Amino acid sequence: MKTIFALAVVLLLSMRSHAEIQAPIPIWPDGAPGALGGTSNDIPTLTLYLPGPTNATGAAMVICPGGGYSHLAAHEGNDYALWLNQHGVACFVLKYRLGSHGYRHPAMLQDAAQAVRLVRAKAADWKIDPKRVGIMGSSAGGHLASTLLTHFDLGSTNAADPVERQSSRPDLGILCYPLITLGEYTHRGSKDNLLGTHPPPELVKLLSNELQVTTNTPPCFLWCTYEDKTVPMENSLMFAGALRKNHVPFDLHIYQKGRHGLGLNDNPPFAHPHPWANDCLFWLKEQGFVP
């Protein structure tokens, strides 16, 4: 047992030594639009996890942790980033504004869009390919990711700010047990934190993202579990159905067993992650994100 533990520690230290984890950087240097103050809760950031030069693929992933739009789950941010770093993907974990801190839509979408733009604008500095920038999210973070996948814009070519010139359209999406709809199968707490308790019907429809898929929506990987009672699998089914209807390529995996919020269901160095991880890597290879 001691030998196995020692080996795990060595592997973890080796993994961390090959990944460069940088201090969080604000995504809005002059303050976020509509900021309610100047505390940490009002300052969205990106934490950079850059893979070592020997295995970097040039692909990048903006990661939106879940947490019901009330908090951010570390295992759906930090852990995903460390795992993807092992496979050469540069990761950027987004701390976006939350309903529990007084924010409502569109603050969260603004933060996600700005994160993708910033990653593209700094592509040369971070040695990534601006045409291989994905977005990943779990639970409510999956709702945020799916919101950007269906509500992006192509940037303002005449903007003075080089970040604003960049497109906010991700090149692909990874949605882990995602909240998608704000209708019958929604998670009420997330919906309330995002829109308030009495949102207008047209806003509920706008952010029920299964209704917003078009032929321009990027390819997606989705997974969830049959046993998930917090965010029912119907969310993933509806989004996949909309992707199919609009001829957008996708992978959909529904596993029988598993609670909501599984993440990788493992700890660093991720020797035995949930099967979705290998399924996702297979898909990412097909998309040209990993070798």
Image: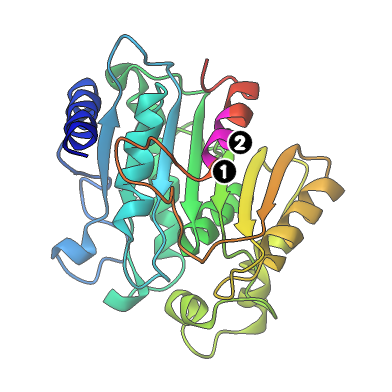
Q: Name the residue under label 1.
A: 276
Q: Which of 14 and 183 is in front in this view?
A: 14
91 in the magenta segment:
no
Q: Distance between the residues labelled 1 and 2?
A: 5 Å
Q: Residues within 10 Å of mark 2 (few under 14, many from 20)?
A: some
Residue found at the far front of this picture: 1
Q: Which residue is drawn at 22% across and 55% down?
A: 31
Q: Which of 251 and 262 is in front in this view?
A: 262
Q: Which of 183 and 225 is in front in this view?
A: 225
Q: What residue type is labelled 1?
A: Trp
Left or right of 123: which side holds 194?
A: right
Q: Name the residue under label 2.
A: 279
Residue 185 percent across, percent down from the top left? 67, 76
Q: What element carries label 2?
A: helix
Left or right of 229: which side holds 11?
A: left
Vertical arrangement, residue 237 with respect to residue 13, above or below = below
Residue 132 percent across, percent down from the top left? 51, 25
The segment highlighted magenta reads 277-281
Vertical arrangement, residue 174 with respect to residue 166, above or below = below
Residue 113 percent across, percent down from the top left? 45, 47
Left or right of 241: which side holds 63?
A: left
Residue found at the far bottom of this picture: 198
Q: What element carries label 1?
A: helix
Q: Nearer the viewer, residue 246 or 138?
A: 138
Res. 93 visible in picture = yes
Q: Residue at x 79, y 54 (%)?
A: 242
Asked whether the residues under the numbered discs 1 and 2 touch, taking CB atoms below 8 Å apart as contact, a structural biologist would say: yes
Q: Which amino acid does label 2 sit on?
A: Asp
Q: Place residue 2 in its image quadrant.
A: top left
